[in-house]
Image (cartoon, coloured by chain):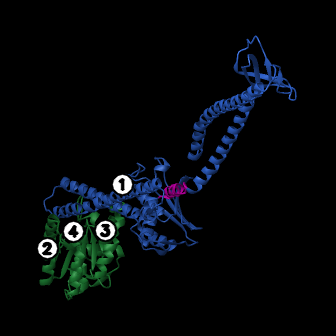
Chain colours: A green, B blue
């Protein structure tokens, strides 16, 4: 799985690269428009992360260029300008997703996974983690081949955990994923706890291992050994 | 007092003493001219009288006028002073003394000396003064009248550009800067004024624009450093051997960054609203939006044990930007949740173009008029950014709606009027 990261800020580039590398992706990066345009023109990528404001040009032009050349890469725009105009423009040009800075690496990771899944680069539409099978198109979860009835939030929570398995995800990150912009308006931590408790109970009831580890003070880790 | 009236008064104040001086001067001039004229006539008559004397065969008295005051009398012992004398004579018709000019001279013809007395009544000084006073009073009257008329005409015509500039200034609103312009006029001074005003307004507008852009740019510039901190924090959290208090610190840092990011986002939103960057309007059903948002918060109402009462019988359709409509209603509802009591209630009512949201809660600790000001928050709500109500106010202002707040029977009421 090959990703091109187009971001001019070196520190941000480094940390995104590291995080995605740990996820097992091959990550290449470009720091300005010219280099990005070159790489995008020459190599094939599964996913391209592109910042809008770049030295020597606009990330939107790269999106345009990719679409004109018939690239099949999934495109996620990452921008400091959280403007609906840029978002609409980017999506109109053919970008698949839009993520406003400052974002969580776990959130970026789950978006990349969702995008790749949607494009079915795996040739496999289901996600399997030991006894858990998720069918994203039907939003269905099976444990040991038996369906588990989950609420929308519980399903999103499980998918987010599995997308970021074996990683510590903070409660804030989860809250933001589940409630988006509204998460900062409420004390969502208690909420997460309620949903998580229900999710855990439903999974364990079906004979599933309790994979969720509580990391004191920070959040949770969906720990799947091996 | 109008500038024109002031000018009039100053003109009159200056012209009155001038008129008085002019009156006095003309009085003296006319008086002396009249005297000179009389004297000349008397001199001519004197020559005539001398000729008369020359024609006499023997010395005798001759009375030249009916009242015998003008006469030629032979005299031997002539003591009276000769020359012009101011005197007065009794006018039997008018029955009063009238001013007169008398010329007395001596003439010697064939060894006989004659005394010639000639008298001419003159216009009385008083009469002259009265005449002059009347004339000048008339002039002053005409002056005042013409001032009034001229000034009225001036204010109608000459000052017209000034008044139009003034009304333009009164209408000026910086948000609609482009619609205001002070036009070129053909009076130099007013044109200079308009040019200066245009220049000043443009400068103020560009400064204002710059200021607004600064807020937005500064907030945008902060997003990338925040992203870097956040990303590195995520990486740090993956570390295996963090001690408990280190994790607690990481959590504190994360919470703080989250707050900072929210603050930044709210500031950007606020400046976007103020910069009118949400332009696309649609017909919005407030009823639909309200239901959607409250459905979204059902979890929250339950967990906080808040009873929600919805009275959405009359829908209100409003033309506005959907994003802003959602932010407006979301912020009002979130505000009602945040500042609620345990086991409190929220009542949302929609009727007659009004959206009213009421929630139970303690009375305000800050003055009511501070409620919509940025960062002024009721200290009970430490988690609040203090921008929610400013955002609400900004949206309401953008569309010319009105928002009212009051507190009664232990309920906070926010009322948005969409008219």
Residue B111 or residue B398, whichever sits in front: B111
Chain of the residue where label 3 is placed in the rendered structure:
A
Instruction: Describe residue B39's horizontal placement relative to residue B226 as left or right.
Output: right
On the image, numbered disc 3 is attached to which residue? A82
Locate residue B394, reporting x and y percent.
44, 60
Magenta highlight range:
B158-172
Q: Which residue is painted at 48% across and 60% down in the image?
A: B185
**From where the camera sits, is residue A12 visible?**
yes
Query: Number of callouts in the render?
Result: 4
Looking at the rendered structure, which numbered label has been put on residue A30?
2
Neighbours of disc 4 within 10 Å: few (<14), some (14-19), many (20+):
many
Can you say which quadrant of the picture contains the C terminus of chain B?
A: bottom right
Q: CA distance from mark 2 to mark 3?
A: 22 Å
Visible residue check, residue A2: no
Q: Do tag 2 and tag 3 residues touch (Cβ < 8 Å)? A: no
**Cα distance between the residues tagged 1 and 2:** 39 Å
Task: Classify mark 1: residues with Cα within 10 Å, few (<14), some (14-19) or many (20+).
Answer: few
Front residue of B47/B164: it is B47
| Label 4 residue SS | helix
């Amino acid at each position: 799985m090959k990703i091109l990261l187009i971001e001019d800020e070196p520190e941000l580039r480094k940390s995104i690269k590291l995080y995605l590398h740990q996820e097992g992706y091959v990550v290449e990066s470009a720091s300005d428009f010219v280099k990005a345009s070159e790489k995008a023109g020459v190599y094939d990528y599964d996913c391209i992360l592109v910042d809008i404001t770049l030295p020597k040009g606009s990330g939107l032009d790269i999106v345009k260029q990719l679409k004109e050349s018939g690239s099949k890469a999934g495109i996620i725009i990452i921008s400091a300008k959280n403007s609906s105009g840029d978002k609409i423009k980017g999506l109109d040009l053919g970008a698949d997703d839009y993520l406003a800075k400052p974002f969580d690496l776990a959130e970026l990771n789950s978006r990349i996974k969702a995008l790749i899944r949607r494009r079915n680069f795996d040739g496999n539409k289901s996600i399997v983690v030991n006894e858990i099978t998720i069918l994203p198109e039907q939003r269905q979860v099976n444990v040991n081949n038996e369906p588990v009835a989950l609420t929308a939030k519980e399903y999103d929570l499980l998918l987010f955990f599995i997308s970021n398995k074996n990683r510590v995800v903070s409660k804030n990150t989860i809250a933001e994923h589940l409630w988006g912009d509204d998460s900062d308006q409420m004390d969502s931590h208690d909420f997460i706890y309620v949903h998580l408790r229900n999710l855990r109970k439903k999974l364990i009831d079906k004979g599933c291992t309790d994979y969720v580890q509580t990391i004191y003070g920070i959040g949770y880790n969906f720990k799947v050994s091996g | 007092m109008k500038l024109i009236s002031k000018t009039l008064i100053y003109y009159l104040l200056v012209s009155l003493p001038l008129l008085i001086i002019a009156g006095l001067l003309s009085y003296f001039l006319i008086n002396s001219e009249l005297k000179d004229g009389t004297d000349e006539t008397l001199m001519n008559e004197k020559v005539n009288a001398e000729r008369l004397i020359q024609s006499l065969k023997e010395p005798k008295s001759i009375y030249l006028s009916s009242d015998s005051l003008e006469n030629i009398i032979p005299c031997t012992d002539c003591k009276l002073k000769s020359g012009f004398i101011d005197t007065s004579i009794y006018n039997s018709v008018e029955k009063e003394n009238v001013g007169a000019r008398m010329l007395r001279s001596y003439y010697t013809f064939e060894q006989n000396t004659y005394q010639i007395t000639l008298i001419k009544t003159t216009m009385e000084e008083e009469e002259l003064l009265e005449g002059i006073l009347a004339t000048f009073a008339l002039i002053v009257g005409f002056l005042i009248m013409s001032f009034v008329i001229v000034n009225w005409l001036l204010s109608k015509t000459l000052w017209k550009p000034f008044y139009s500039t003034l009304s333009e200034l009164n209408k000026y609103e910086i948000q609609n800067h482009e619609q205001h312009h002070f036009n070129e006029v053909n009076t130099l001074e007013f044109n200079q004024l308009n040019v200066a005003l245009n220049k000043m307004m443009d400068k103020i507008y560009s400064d204002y624009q710059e200021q607004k852009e600064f807020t937005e740019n500064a907030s945008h510039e902060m997003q990338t450093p925040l992203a870097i901190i956040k990303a590195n924090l995520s990486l740090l959290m993956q570390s295996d051997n963090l001690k408990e208090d280190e994790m607690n610190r990481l959590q504190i840092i994360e919470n703080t960054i989250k707050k900072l990011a929210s603050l930044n986002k709210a500031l950007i939103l606020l400046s976007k609203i103020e910069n009118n960057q949400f332009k696309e309007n649609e017909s919005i059903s407030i009823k639909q939006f309200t239901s959607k948002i409250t459905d979204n918060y059902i979890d929250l109402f339950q967990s906080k044990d808040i009873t929600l009462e919805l009275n959405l019988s009359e829908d209100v359709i409003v033309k506005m930007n959907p994003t802003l409509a959602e932010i407006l209603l979301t912020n009002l509802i979130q505000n009602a949740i945040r500042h609620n009591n345990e086991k409190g209630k929220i009542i949302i009512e929609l009727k007659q173009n009004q959206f009213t949201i009421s929630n139970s809660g303690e009375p305000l600790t800050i003055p009511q008029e501070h409620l919509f000001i940025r960062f002024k928050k009721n200290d009970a709500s430490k988690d609040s950014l203090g921008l929610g109500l400013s955002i609400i106010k900004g949206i309401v202002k953008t569309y010319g709606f009105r928002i009212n707040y009051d507190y009664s029977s232990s309920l906070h009421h926010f009322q948005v009027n969409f008219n």
